[in-house]
Amino acid sequence: MDNKRHLKKGILAIVIIVIASVILSFSLYIRNYFSDQTVDEMVFYLFNGVGGTSKDVILTGIQKSLFPFFMILLALLLPICRFKDRINMIEMNVNRKKLHFSIFPNKTLYKYRFSYSVIVLVLSLFAGYHLIGVKQYVASLTDYSTFIEENYAGGADVNLTFPEQKRNLIILYMESMENSFISKENGGGWEYSVVPELENLALKHINFSNTEKIGGAYQVEGTGWTVAGIVSTTTRLPLKIPINGNEYTSSDQFLAGAYALGDVLKEAGYNLEFMAGSDANFGGRSNYFKKHGDYKIFDVNTAIEQGKMDESDRVWWGFDDTHLFTWAKEEITELAEQDKPFNFTFLTANTHFQDGYLEEGAEEIYGTQYENVYAYSSKQVAEFVEWLQQQPNTTLVILGDHLSMQDPKFFEEHLSDEYERTIYNVFINSVATPVQEKNRTFTSLDMYPTILASIGVQIEGERLGLGTNLFSGEKTLTEEHKFNFVNEELAKNSDFYNSNILRDDYLYLLEQTEETNQES
C-alpha cells in the first residue's frame, strides 16, 4: 500500500512539474516576444476567441516555446530522478575513506518530491505573475481614476455641424503600420526606406507628427491591438473590459454608451460599410460596427457567400490584401453611384505579426520577410490611392491600427535607443488645413475629431471624448498633462467608463466571470 501511495505521489509530482514548466516557458515566450503588449490586450483576445487569428501565429508560439519547455522540465525533474547506473555518483577520498555523493536524485528533494513540486509550481506562478506583467494589470484594476470622467467631452452633447455638401470618407486601417519603417532621413527609424510609397504620401499630404519630420501618434493603454485601435480612433476612448470578462462577442451592446463615428455619420445620412479579410466577428468587430452605425459588413464569410472565393481559397486568416483592395474598389464604386454620401472603412492584414504574409509575386528585396511584406503593402496602398483620385468629393484617411507586435528584437536591430515608435497617419484631400501639423504630442484618441474635421465638420470646442481636433490649435490631453501621466491614468479602472460607456455590459461581464468561476 505504501509503495502505491509513493508511486501516486511521484506521478502527481511529475504532473505538477510539467504544469510549472508550461507556465514558465509560456511566460518567457510572452516576455521575449510580446514585451510591448499589455495584459489587457491578451485578456481581450483570450476571451474573444482566436477564430480570426492565423493558425501560423499560434503554431509559431508553440514551436518557439517547445525548446525552453523541455529545458526547464529537464532542469526541474533531474533533482528527483533516480538512475539505475552510477553516472550520477561522485566518489571522493577523505582520510583514506571513500565517500559517495548522489547528485541525481538529491536525497532530500527525492524524499520530499511532492512538496518540492508544489513549491516549484508556486514559484513558477510567482515568476509568471511578474514576467507577463499581471502584477501591474491587477493593480490597474484595483486602482481607480477619475481622469476619463474629468476630461470626457460628451459625444451627443457636443454640437457638430456638417458642410452643406457632405464629403465621402474612406478610412484605411493598415495592420501594425508604424513610422519606424520610414527612412531616418525623413523621420523614421530605418537606414533605408522600407515603405517609400507611404513615405512619399506622408511628405505630399497632411501627416500629423510628433517631430518636425514624418511622425505620428503615441500608443496609450487600451489602444494597442486592432479592435482597440479601431475603437480608439472612432470613439476617442480606449477599450477597457473587466478582468476575466466572458467573450465580449456574446453581447451585441459593444460599448453601448459610446457615441462613435458611425453613430454620427449614420445620423448625417451616410451609407456605411466595413471590410476586412478575416472573420469580422473576431474580437467583436462586427458587433461594434453593427451597434454603432449599422455598417454593412464584408468579410471572408461574405466573400465565400457571394461566390468570390471558395472555402479552400482561404489564406492565413481569410483572404489576402490583393483581394481586399480589388473588392474594396468594387464596393466603393457601387457606393459612389448612390445618391448619399458614404463612409467606407477597411482593414489590411498582410503585415500582421509574426513575419507577415508575403503574397505570391511580391518582390523579396530586403533581408527579412517582414520588411518585404511591408514594402509590398506600401506599393498596394500607393496603387489604391492613385485609383482613388478619380473619386470626387472624397477624403481618404490612412491610419496604422497600432504599433507592430513583432518580436522587439527585430526593431532593436534597426532603431536607435532614442527613437520613439509612433503610429502612421496621412490625410489626403482634407478640406481642413492644420494650424500646427508637426511637433505635436497626441494619441490615437485624437483621431476621431480630426477625421470629422477633415471632411469639413465643425466641432464645438474642438474636442470630443478624450480626443482633440488636431487641425485646430487646441492642446491635446497629452500636451496638457504629459504622455506618461495620461497613459498611467488610462491604465487604471474607471467608474465613469464602467457605468457610462460599458453600461449593462460591465455587470454582464462580471456576472459571466462569476458563473465561469463557479463552474470551474
Image (spheres, grey):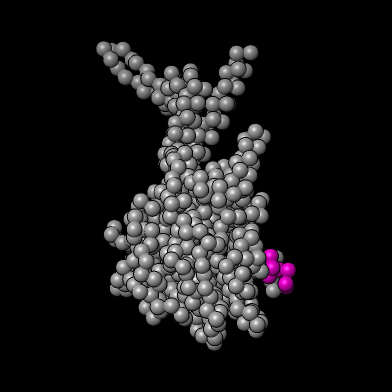
Q: Height in image: 4 above or below 514?
A: above
Q: Is 417 left or right of 346, judged from the image as shown? A: left
Q: Is 192 left or right of 24, judged from the image as shown? A: left
The secondary structure making up most of the magenta span is helix
**Image point (54%, 26%), residue name:** 13
Q: Quadrant of residue 341?
A: bottom right
The outermost residue toward the left is: 95
Q: Is residue 501 magenta?
A: no
Magenta segment, which residues?
300-307
Q: Position of residue 243 (x, y in %)?
A: 54, 43
Judge by depth and name the residue closer to the eye, 202 or 353: 202
Q: Position of residue 14 (x, y in %)?
A: 54, 29
Q: Look at the image and tell me in which quarter the N terminus lies.
A: top right
Judge by depth and name the residue closer to the eye, 405 or 473: 473
Q: Height in image: 143 above or below 12?
A: below
Judge by depth and name the residue closer to the eye, 382 or 206: 206
Q: Quadrant of residue 136?
A: top left
Looking at the image, can residue 103 be seen?
yes
Q: Quadrant of residue 346?
A: bottom right
Q: Is 296 left or right of 478, judged from the image as shown? A: right
Q: Position of residue 364 (x, y in %)?
A: 45, 72
**Image point (60%, 76%), residue name:** 342
Judge by depth and name the residue closer to the eye, 28 or 211: 211
Q: Look at the image and tell me in which quarter the C terminus lies.
A: top right
Q: Position of residue 112 (x, y in %)?
A: 48, 19
**Image point (46%, 79%), residue name:** 430
**Image point (55%, 82%), residue name:** 165
Looking at the image, can residue 445 be seen?
no
